[in-house]
Amino acid sequence: MNGLLTDLYELTMAAGFWAAGKWAEPAVFDLTLRRLPRYRNYVLAAGLEQAAEYLRGLAFTAEEIDYLRGLPQFAGAPADFFPALREFRFRGDVDAVPEGTILFAGEPVLQVRAALPQGQIPETYLLAAITHQTLIATKAARVVLEARGRPVIEFGTRRAHSAEAGVLGARAAYLGGCAGSSNTLAGFRYGVPPMGTAAHSWVLSFPHEIDAFRALQRVLGAATVQLVDTYDVCEGVRRAAAVGRPWWGIRIDSGDFVALSRAARQILDEAGFPDARILISGDLDEYRIRDLLAAGARVDAFGVGTELAVSADAPAMGAVYKLAEVGGRPAAKRSPEKTTLPGAKQLFRFPVHDVVGLASEPCPAGAVPVLEPVLRDGELVRPHPSLAAIRERARAALDALPAPWRALEPAMPYPVHISEALQRLAATT
């Protein structure tokens, strides 16, 4: 239902629309990337599936409506507004960039065409759904690129801002290129490969470290990853090697990763296990991974938690949701630094630049329109693509992104132009 999962002013405006006779007035709303997050040259769009499903289920229960009746802000609302809420459903159209699409500052992400309250009430949820997963997917893409082909596992649910944020973050991280997640529900719900074996408490629960290793291997067999840094790392590696096959390898969760991974590699090789892999975890991000590999760390995989789950260096995104057309009339803000563009829009992608234009414009030669139909009359145009297909789209987009924008270092803004038709409309609005 989720009718109350919005800011109060969305609902007070809805009451005002009813009172003003604007309940059925057609409108267009844009969700636009006003500016990139800090330290980002691009973002990787994510969260559309959740946004669409929210709209498909948007409604108010009798209990929710009774709650609104009792709020002082609705004391002056017309009595017939509340029965209208009981029948409220989203019956509009949505176009959006597909998940896994790379976007830049100033570009539209999603567009809603619906009756005015149907477009207004969803603002809060749509911004939250898109911005959260987009931030995590983008962070994951950066981490994965710096891992240089080594698997990255998302470990961050325990550090996420809520348990559900951890589940959706795991989805977004997989979309962005992570090999899997420690979050089991993300595996069940979205097909994200679940990964993980045991914590330090497992080792500490046994009187001897090697007993813990043997017991774990009896349960997990070839999937066993022995956690070797509970006591002394090198001794832990030797004991893991003494247990031997079948196993995947070892995990080091603390210490000097360069020195310890080199020492572990030597111990494993000399013990006859050149195929045993080394996973490291603990306060990792793309910068630390880059530096560890540059320093010669012998690492086969990475577990990344906190920094990924909260996109720690760029935890917010300047996305906005604004009215672009109402009653057939274009609408735009003029306030300094927060100016918006009027009209229903399309994003046209050329090989080396993008153009934001009007949805009514023909697609220019050499360009591809990026926004695609998602909902018509409140229903899906087509089933949601699989997460695996979205992940592949993201991988291909990242591979095609020119190196300056793919790098960690800040790049010049990607060329995003405004079409002549949109410029003319903006000048006269």
Image (tube, rainbow, N blue to C red):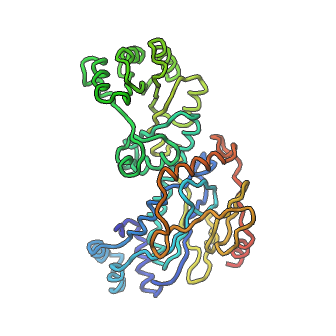
Q: Is residue 230 left or right of residue 282?
A: left
- Furthest-top residue in view? 270
* Residue 216 in view (yes/no): yes
* Residue depicted at x 63% and y 45%: 399
* Residue 76 in view (yes/no): no
* Residue depicted at x 42% and y 78%: 14
Q: How many marks are shown on the rendered structure?
A: 0
Q: Is residue 386 above or below residue 245?
A: below
Q: Classify the position of the C terminus by image quarter.
A: bottom right
| Rendered image quadrant of residue 342 | bottom right
Q: Which sits in the foreground, 294 or 190? A: 190
| Rendered image quadrant of residue 371 | bottom right
| Rendered image quadrant of residue 73 | bottom left
Q: In this view, does 11 lie above or below 299?
A: below
Q: In this view, does 244 lie above or below 168?
A: above
* Residue depicted at x 45% and y 44%: 309
Q: Classify the position of the N terminus by image quarter.
A: bottom left
Residue 296 coordinates in the image, percent (x, y): 58, 22
Residue 7 coordinates in the image, percent (x, y): 41, 67
Residue 107 coordinates in the image, percent (x, y): 63, 61
* Residue depicted at x 39% and y 25%: 247
Residue 189 coordinates in the image, percent (x, y): 37, 52
